[in-house]
Image (tube, rainbow, N blue to C red):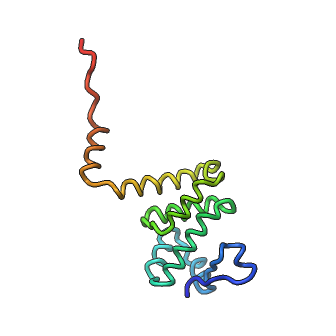
Amino acid sequence: MLLRQAQGPQNDANGGYVVDETTRQRAVAHWEGHSAFLSLFDETAGTDRTAIIRAMGTAIENAEKHPDISAQVLDIVTSMNLTQVEGSIKRLAKKPIATKNRVLQDAIDSYKVSRIIATLTYERIRKIYQQLTTPPACTNPT
């Protein structure tokens, strides 16, 4: 299993999930940012993929320890449209760190906007676009 439930002191440090040694070494040796994560995600299924998503939720919620890492994970979640961690994002948004760290706040806002956009219909998006691009009518003709 890619991620396994941690036992003992490791559990406290990372919220209950650790990456197995082979995967950790592979990630360190071949780290290429988002593309490395996407490759790893694409290679998993079932319980391994569920474990990755849970670990991402844990990383997001542990923003007090590593806000920049949480923001990066949140950017990945946003780009992949993963709604399974929405509860973690909502809990994070209520924490003081979410308003104190600008990078983290921007990542949370981007996720919220992406969720709003995902619910809009084409017609609604077209109307919003027209409203934003149509000049205002002149109310004081001279």
Instruction: Tell me if residue 68 comes above or below residue 2 in the rendering.
Output: above
Q: Residue 12 at what x, y percent from top left? A: 72, 74
Instruction: Tell me if residue 40 comes above or below residue 1 in the rendering.
Output: above
Q: Quick one: quadrant of the C terminus?
A: top left
Taking the view exactly as shown, the residue that stands out farthest to the top is 142
Residue at image position (60%, 67%) is: 59
- 82 sits to left or right of 95: left
Looking at the rendered structure, the number of numbered marks drawn on it comes to: 0
Q: Residue 31 at what x, y percent from top left? A: 55, 73
- 127 sits to left or right of 10: left
Instruction: Tell me if residue 93 comes above or below residue 53 in the rendering.
Output: above
Q: Quick one: quadrant of the N terminus?
A: bottom right
Residue at image position (69%, 62%) is: 65
- 68 sits to left or right of 75: right
Q: Nearer the viewer, residue 40 or 31?
A: 40
Taking the view exactly as shown, the residue that stands out farthest to the right is 9
Q: Nearer the viewer, residue 103 or 108?
A: 108
Residue at image position (48%, 65%) is: 77
Q: Nearer the viewer, residue 102 or 82?
A: 82
Q: Residue 101 at what x, y percent from top left? A: 63, 50
Q: Residue 71 at what x, y percent from top left? A: 57, 59
Instruction: Tell me if residue 33 comes above or below residue 17 in the rendering.
Output: above
Residue at image position (51%, 83%) is: 48
